[in-house]
Image: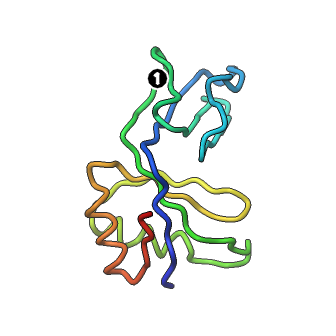
Amino acid sequence: MPLALQLIPGEFAVCRLPPDSSVPSWLGSGMFSSVTRTVDELSIICPTAQVPPGIKHEAGWRLLKLQGPFAFTETGILASVLAPLAAAKIGILATATFDTDYVLLKASRLEVALRTLEVAGHTVHRD
């Protein structure tokens, strides 16, 4: 299933806060952010530049948007992206919204990942 993917500009970070933390005011309203709360943690994905000192995080991620929207009944969307990346031993972090999926890739592996996805038949828009 060939897809169109959009490389989102900038570097992103994945942050871990205690599970009872409030959503922090530093999160702001950048181009992309994601907040997930579980009983174990409050996890935030946001532009690296927004993360203040002292916050546990891992920076160096780039973000790919799968051009949706996709109906909830569609199957194999994310798998069509993740399978070639897994075969190339490229680790990812996936997240989703109501309309589409996003895949974070380490910046150090970005070019290899994008070539892998193009060889798999996907179109990657880099602008």
How many marks can you see? 1
User: Which residue is label 1 attached to?
Assistant: 56
For the point 46% across and 23% down, the residue is 56
In the image, residue 111 lies at what x, y percent?
28, 61
Q: Nearer the viewer, residue 106 or 85?
A: 106
For the point 39% across and 35% down, the residue is 59
- Lateral position of residue 69 relative to residue 18, left or right: right
Q: Nearer the viewer, residue 32 or 57?
A: 32
Residue placed furthest toward the top: 54
In the image, residue 120 lies at what x, y percent?
36, 80
SS at circle 1:
loop
Q: Image height check: is 102 above or below 119? A: above
- Lateral position of residue 11 relative to residue 100, left or right: left
Q: Nearer the viewer, residue 109 or 90?
A: 109
In the image, residue 8 lies at what x, y percent?
49, 55
Q: Image height check: is 121 above or below 60? A: below
Q: Callout 1, which amino acid?
A: Lys
The quadrant in which the C terminus is found is bottom left
In the image, residue 26 lies at what x, y percent?
62, 24
User: Which class describes the residues within 10 Å of circle 1: few (<14), some (14-19), or many (20+)?
Assistant: some
For the point 51% across and 76% down, the residue is 4
Q: Quadrant of residue 96?
A: bottom right
Q: Image height check: is 66 above or below 97? A: below
- Lateral position of residue 111 relative to residue 12, left or right: left
Instruction: Tell me how the rendering is colored.
Output: rainbow
Q: Nearer the viewer, residue 32 or 23?
A: 32
Q: Image height check: is 45 above or below 114? A: above
Q: Quadrant of residue 25?
A: top right
For the point 70% across and 26% down, the residue is 23
- Lateral position of residue 100 relative to residue 13, left or right: right
Residue placed furthest toward the front: 127
